[in-house]
Amino acid sequence: MSSTPLMQATGLTRRFGGLVAVDGVSIDLHRGQVHAVIGTNGAGKSTLINLLSGEIPLSSGEIRLAGQDITALSQPRRARSGVGRSYQRTTIFPTLPVLENCRLAAQAARQRPWTLWEGAQSCRASLEAARAALDAAGLADAHQLPAGSMSHGKKRQLEIAMCLATNPQVLLLDEPLAGMGAEESERMLSMLERLRADHAILLVEHDMDAVFRVADCITVMVNGAVIASGSPESVRSSPEVQRAYLGEGHA
Ligand SMILES: Nc1ncnc2c1ncn2[C@@H]1O[C@H](COP(=O)(O)OP(=O)(O)OP(=O)(O)O)[C@@H](O)[C@H]1O
């Protein structure tokens, strides 16, 4: 693990009217690490991802990427700076081929001025980025399939590929295993293990076996606040976490 965090969030707070959905949360993401965020329904995990990606503004707090303050950057500018995210819902164009879905994601992230020459160049670069992302996501043999014809698990893999096509350094993944069968989950976990080397990954996930298998670090949220953060061993043995969240099965 490198000692300087790639993404460093300090004192993040988000209020919705009288509700404090995220309450003074600080979290560091390091390249080469999977940092899982767990918590009961409504704990504030998705809101935390939305704050880090820039989808919604902070009430207070600061976010740095590679030392630069990105707190004021919009979501598209954060994405171009290297912050990629996946969603809980599938966000693909079902009738388009897999490769085209991925190429569009790559092209949207580039946003170059449109001239014939630069357009052709940009198109070629987007296509290359899309092919590389599909390879990395284990979809090398699915390029020409209509995206909507694939299994749920492969659609989720495609979403990660679309995120990879934007060349992110940080991956914010919101429940990538949701709705998956055992074999699909296994494929996704292997992919995360491969992607870890080159990225800083934040993983929000309800599947505790998966979390304890892949996470290098776990942060536990309850009612918007962090009640524990550290190695899987320290979180597993924290009496407060066991009381609040994990139950006897993981004690
Ligand atoms: N746009 C919004 N407006 C008002 N309240 C919101 C909004 N988004 C989230 N909340 C509230 O903030 C709290 C945290 O929600 P959030 O979706 O972040 O939790 P979560 O930990 O991701 O839950 P889950 O595991 O069910 O996805 C909840 O009480 C939710 O109702």
Image: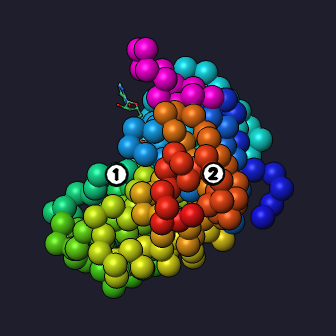
Residue 118 coordinates in the image, percent (x, y): 47, 53
Residue 66 visible, this angle: yes
User: Which residue is found at the position 78% from the left and 64% from the top?
Assistant: 1
| Image: 208 above or below 10 | below
| Magenta-drawn stretch, dominant element (helix, strand or loop) | strand
Please tell me in which quadrant of the rendered image residue 146 appears: bottom left
State yes or no: Cβ of the residue under disc 1 lies below 8 Å from any atom of ligand 1: yes
Residue 46 coordinates in the image, percent (x, y): 43, 42
Q: Residue furthest right?
A: 3
Residue 233 coordinates in the image, percent (x, y): 68, 64
Residue 243 coordinates in the image, percent (x, y): 54, 48
Among numbered discs 1 and 2, the one appearing first in the sequence = 1
Circles 1 and 2: CB atoms closer than 8 Å? no
Foreground pick, 204 / 251: 251
Please give the label number shown on residue 142: none
The quarter of the picture showing ligand 1: top left
Please give the label number shown on residue 88: 1
Instruction: Give the residues drawn in magenta, as a range.
Output: 13-24
The amino acid pointed to by label 1 is Gln
According to the image, label 2 marks what residue?
Answer: 239
User: Which residue is found at the position 39% from the left and 82% from the top?
Assistant: 140
| Image: 167 above or below 140 | above
Residue 126 visible, this angle: no
User: Which residue is found at the position 57% from the left and 64% from the top?
Assistant: 251
What secondary structure is found at the residue carrying circle 1? loop
Q: Is residue 18 magenta?
A: yes
User: Which residue is found at the position 49% from the left and 50% from the top?
Assistant: 245
Foreground pick, 208 / 245: 245
Q: Residue furthest bottom?
A: 141
The amino acid pointed to by label 2 is Pro
Q: Is residue 25 magenta?
A: no
- Distance from Cα at disc 1 to Cα at disc 2: 30 Å
